[in-house]
């Protein structure tokens, strides 16, 4: 799906331009989806939660290109756009999964746990 791979760099660019706070970005991309889908142990850095974190360089400038896309469609509506702010590493469950654009080790992940659907926001 176009956009999954580019949402963070595009939003970091908005943070750098002063249109969005970093705190609001974390709320929109981390905390809110976990609440919406009722995910347990995700969306915040706290004891008892999975150690999932993305490390970013707020000063890195990159131009988004179709050739960078790993999605099956192979394109992005943001091709040619230069952004400031780029993910440098991803830690999943306390283990490095991506560093400087390269996947590190075998694919990782854990089974997701969901809250009782009756407790989700309507």
Image: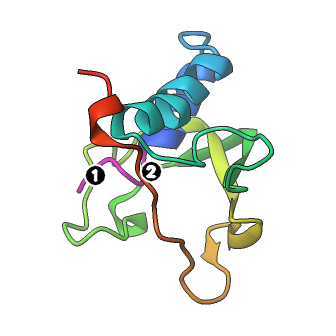
Q: Is mark 1 on a helix, strand or loop?
A: loop
Residue 63 falls within the magenta-colored stretch? no
Q: What stretch is highlighted in magenta?
A: 1-6
Q: What element carries label 2?
A: loop
Above or below residue 14? Residue 53 is: below
User: The C terminus lies in which quarter of the figure?
Assistant: top left
- Could one spot residue 106 in this view of the protein? yes
The location of residue 99, given as percent across then percent down, is 71, 69
- Dots 2, 1 in contact, CB < 8 A: yes
Pointer 1: residues within 10 angstroms few (<14), some, or many (20+)? Answer: many
The location of residue 35, given as percent across then percent down, is 44, 32
Please tell me which residue lies in front, 72 or 61. Answer: 72
The location of residue 5, given as percent across then percent down, is 42, 54
At 61% from the left and 21% from the top, the residue drawn is: 15
| Residue labelled with disc 1 | 76
- Could one spot residue 82 in this view of the protein? no
At 52% from the left and 47% from the top, the residue drawn is: 40
Pointer 2: residues within 10 angstroms few (<14), some, or many (20+)? Answer: some
The location of residue 101, given as percent across then percent down, is 62, 68
**In the visual, does 69 lie left or right of 51?**
left
Residue 5 falls within the magenta-colored stretch? yes
């Amino acid at each position: 799906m176009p956009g999954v791979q580019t949402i963070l760099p595009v939003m970091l660019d908005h943070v750098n331009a002063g249109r969005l706070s970093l705190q609001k970005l974390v709320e929109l991309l981390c905390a809110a989806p976990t609440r919406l889908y009722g995910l347990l142990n995700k969306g915040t850095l706290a004891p008892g939660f999975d150690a999932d974190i993305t490390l970013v360089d707020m000063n890195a400038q990159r131009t988004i290109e179709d050739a960078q896309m790993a999605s099956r469609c192979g394109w992005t509506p943001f091709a040619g756009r230069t952004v400031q702010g780029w993910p440098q590493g991803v830690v999943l469950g306390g283990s490095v999964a991506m560093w400087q654009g390269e996947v590190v080790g075998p694919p990782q992940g854990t089974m997701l746990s969901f809250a009782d659907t009756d407790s989700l926001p309507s």
